[in-house]
Amino acid sequence: MEIVIVETQQQAGELVAEAVVALVERKANPVLGVATGSSPGAVYRELGRRVAQGRLSLKDTQAFMLDEYVGLPADHPQRYRTVIDREFVQPTDIDPANVHGPDGSAQEIEQACADYERAITNAGGIDLQILGIGTDGHIAFNEPGSSLGSRTRLKTLTRQTREDNARFFDDDVASVPKHCLTQGVATIMEARHVVLLAFGQSKVEAIHHMVEGSVSAMWPATALQFHPHVTVVLDESAASRLQ
Ligand code: F6R
């Protein structure tokens, strides 16, 4: 695990954008994994800036989302597909048809999850996965207790995660969906390069466990200790309990 400590989120954005540029230059049909939430915001803004300046094109790139809430209507501003459209698709030149996510409104959930796994495989697998981490150590929505061998499936969000995400729902926990479809830990582990971003004091404990703790399903991010190519980008606060 490579740990990089930056002073600002903008620096993190530039660093990860560089990795995306290098991937796009090296590979004809690159595949990105994209996270929602606050942590990757600076990355998407920087990608948008580079596309606007003509220094990067994502026209031939495919992207796969990590997760999606179950039960939010298609026009809900916090539906993850809507968030990704707003924060990643619109500022860049990626073709929206090349952006995929688990179908949170599917009637046949198991089928939808299997289809999603197959779509990732058919695209050739994820080259670079942009990841955040929950205060409870979740990656994607693999909450504590998730099997480290899990694949895309239906999960129940913990009270902690729903409280953490209430800020996107007018601070009303009751409005945060209780369920989601999420890539599994094993799905994420198949990405060739994982770049995890974490900022702020609230992530201190999760980062400490992920980097220095014992591997355990109770801290799902610890599975990344087994991954051969992980880059962790932190600010001083999130890194403050690392030895
Ligand atoms: C989002 C996701 C989550 C978030 C995590 C951190 O697609 O999969 O794991 O990355 O909850 O969220 P932020 O970045 O908002 O602190």
Image: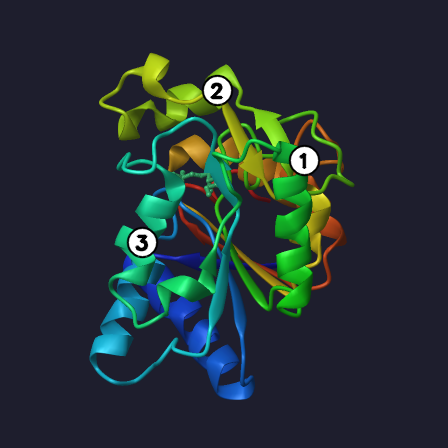
Q: Residue 29, position in %: x, y? A: 54, 79
Mark toward the start of the polypeptide (1 vs 2):
1
How far is disc 1 from disc 2 in space, using C-alphas? 18 Å
Mark number for residue 85? 3
How far is disc 2 from disc 3 in space, using C-alphas? 22 Å
From this viewpoint, is residue 72 visible? Answer: yes
Name the amino acid type tagged 2.
Answer: Lys
User: How many numbered discs, if any?
Assistant: 3
Q: How many other residues sit within 10 Å of disc 3, few (<14), some (14-19) or many (≥20)?
A: some
Dot 3: element: helix
Give ligand 1's quarter of the image: top left
Residue receiving disc 1: 110
Name the amino acid type tagged 1.
Answer: Glu
Dot 1: element: helix
Which residue does the image show at 31% across and 54% down from the upper left?
85
Q: Residue 106, position in %: x, y? A: 53, 35
Mark toward the start of the polypeptide (3 vs 1):
3
Q: Residue 59, position in %: x, y? A: 38, 78
Residue in front for this viewpoint, 196 or 238: 196
Residue receiving disc 2: 178
From this viewpoint, is residue 152 visible? Answer: no
Quarter of the image that includes the C terminus: top right
Which residue does the image show at 54% across and 86% down from the upper left?
26
* Outermost residue, top side: 174
Name the amino acid type tagged 3.
Answer: Asp
